[in-house]
């Protein structure tokens, strides 16, 4: 069923959103992109005359209650965006009464789903090597079904609008769908847009295709890097992983972040790119700092010659030019991960240069997809979110979709 064709009048809808938004030390929302992304779906339900039950996770509480990850902290922000009062259920698994008394047009926000280990469905406090692990896993799967059944019992209809968690087979993202009829479960507007954006990248590639992968570790991006090798013309690898490549090539990286156990992997990636005719673009210089803070001393140096006591914090001017040269002629662009510690204002230059080049290429007709928490925070920080083709709310989900994996959250609804 498509959400546009569904009338929610008189129905209770439980909606899985991804409200895992960043908070400051006082519990204030510092980036509300994900909340704004879900508004079309939430407002459609209320406008039809339905009542709304919102569920999400926040952070990684590992199945335990943690007040710092309570969704109670974002209740007022959600209310402000929806323009109506939002009630709060302090226990997501014991909210039957609050759900039952909801009237059309009313909104209930459930507490963090991950305060229950059943949400993720992984046994807690037992090692994978333990002989009893398999038994514990089986028991947890049964508990996960019960947990999903409880959540489903609150509503008449289920909507999944949480693309950011679509790659997880969790109680609220996939298992819950089993308890609704096909005509009473659907993807929200945001999910539909995300699926379309991924399709544009994968099935409708206009060339040249440039992918920009940033972030600190090669190991977390290896699947996507290998998958992209068969699709892209240019592959820019930047951010912290720069220094693993530099070290692999015999460079001195000082105190820079570096996966010393992944040096062979870095060399292997370089070899594969050459074999496949992919233009692999790596940073050649960096802005190094003598401490991991905004106001440290800085110097520009080659990524191969970073002095002891200094660490690469951002892409240098020569690297930025190389990145720009690979981005500007592109007709399809995928950007995941910043080029440096962009959270510090003095180290935003590399990420800003990428963002500006992506915007310029988009104006020249490229389809640009920006995805992953940090890249999204980047374009928002620079005020450029409206100047790229699409900003994805999903990090891991986006990458797995581009890797060609089936996402359980979508499969549970589409079959």
Image (cartoon, rainbow, N blue to C red):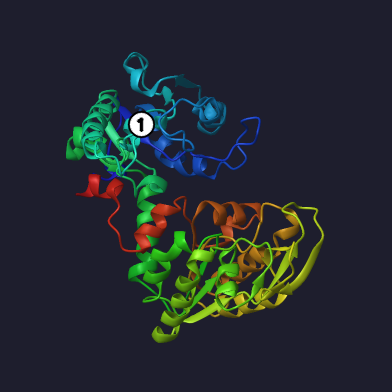
Q: Residue at x 33, y 13 (%)?
A: 97
**Picture residue at 38% right of the left edge, 45% below the top:** 165
Residue denoted by label 1: 117
Relative to 366, does residue 126 appear above or below in the rendering? above
Judge by depth and name the residue closer to the eye, 206 or 294: 294
> In the rendered view, does 289 fall on the left or right side of 238?
right
Identify which residue is drawn at 64% across, 63% down: 351
Query: Could you tell me which secondary element the residue under label 1 belongs to?
Result: helix
Question: Residue 116, can we see it?
Answer: yes
Q: Is residue 171 above or below residue 415?
A: above
**Residue 38 rendering spot, x and y as whole percentages:** 45, 41
Structural crowding at the residue carrying mark 1, measured as other residues with C-alpha within 10 Å and reported as few (<14), some (14–19) or many (≥20): many
Tell me which residue sits at (46%, 20%) in the image: 88
Residue 395 versus residue 224 in the image, above or below: above
Q: Quadrant of residue 308?
A: bottom right
| Residue 116: quadrant of the picture | top left
Pinpoint residue 217: horizontal percent, then vertical percent: 52, 60
Choose between 28 and 222: the one closer to the eye. 222
Q: Position of residue 262 (x, y in %)?
A: 48, 67
- Residue 222 screen position, x and y as percent: 42, 65
Between 84 and 92, the one nearer to me in the picture = 92
Quarter that holds the N terminus = top left
Q: Is residue 348 left or right of residue 71?
A: right
- Disc tally is 1
Q: Is residue 99 visible?
A: no
């Amino acid at each position: 069923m498509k959400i546009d064709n569904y009338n929610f009048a008189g129905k209770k809808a439980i909606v899985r959103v991804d409200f895992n938004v960043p908070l400051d030390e006082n519990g204030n929302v510092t980036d509300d992109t994900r909340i704004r992304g879900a508004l079309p779906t939430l407002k459609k339900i209320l406008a039809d005359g339905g009542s709304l039950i919102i569920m999400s996770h926040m952070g990684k509480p590992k199945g335990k209650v943690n007040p710092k990850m309570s969704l109670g902290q974002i209740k007022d922000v959600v209310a402000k965006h929806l323009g109506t009062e939002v009630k709060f259920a302090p226990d997501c698994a014991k909210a039957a009464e609050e759900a039952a008394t909801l009237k059309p047009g009313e909104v209930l926000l459930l507490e963090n789903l991950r305060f229950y280990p059943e949400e993720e469905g992984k046994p807690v406090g037992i090692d994978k090597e333990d002989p009893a692990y398999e038994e514990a896993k089986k028991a947890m799967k049964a508990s996960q079904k019960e947990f999903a059944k409880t959540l489903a019992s609150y509503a008449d209809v289920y909507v999944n609008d949480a693309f950011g968690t679509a790659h997880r087979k969790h109680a609220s993202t996939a298992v819950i769908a089993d308890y609704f009829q096909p005509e009473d479960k659907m993807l929200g507007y945001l999910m539909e847009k995300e699926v379309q954006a991924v399709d544009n990248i994968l099935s409708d590639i206009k060339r040249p295709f440039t992918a920009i992968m940033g972030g600190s570790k090669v190991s977390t991006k290896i699947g996507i890097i290998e998958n992209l090798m068969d699709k892209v013309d240019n592959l820019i690898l930047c951010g912290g992983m720069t220094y693993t490549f530099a070290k692999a090539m015999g460079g001195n990286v000082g105190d820079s972040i570096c996966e010393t156990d992944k040096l062979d992997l870095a060399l292997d990636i370089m070899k594969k790119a050459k074999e496949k005719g992919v233009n692999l673009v790596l940073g050649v210089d960096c802005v190094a700092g003598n401490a991991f803070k905004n106001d440290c001393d800085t110097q520009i140096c080659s990524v191969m010659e970073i002095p002891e006591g200094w660490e690469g914090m951002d892409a240098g001017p020569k690297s930025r030019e190389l990145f720009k040269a690979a981005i500007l002629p592109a007709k399809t662009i995928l950007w995941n991960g910043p080029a440096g510690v962009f959270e510090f204002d003095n180290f935003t230059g590399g990420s800003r240069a990428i963002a500006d080049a992506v915007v310029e290429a988009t104006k020249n007709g490229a389809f640009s997809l920006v995805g992953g928490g940090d890249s999204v925070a980047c374009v928002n920080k620079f005020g450029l979110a409206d100047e790229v083709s699409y900003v994805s709310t999903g990090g891991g989900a986006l990458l797995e979709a581009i890797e060609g994996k089936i996402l359980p959250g979508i499969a549970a609804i589409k079959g």
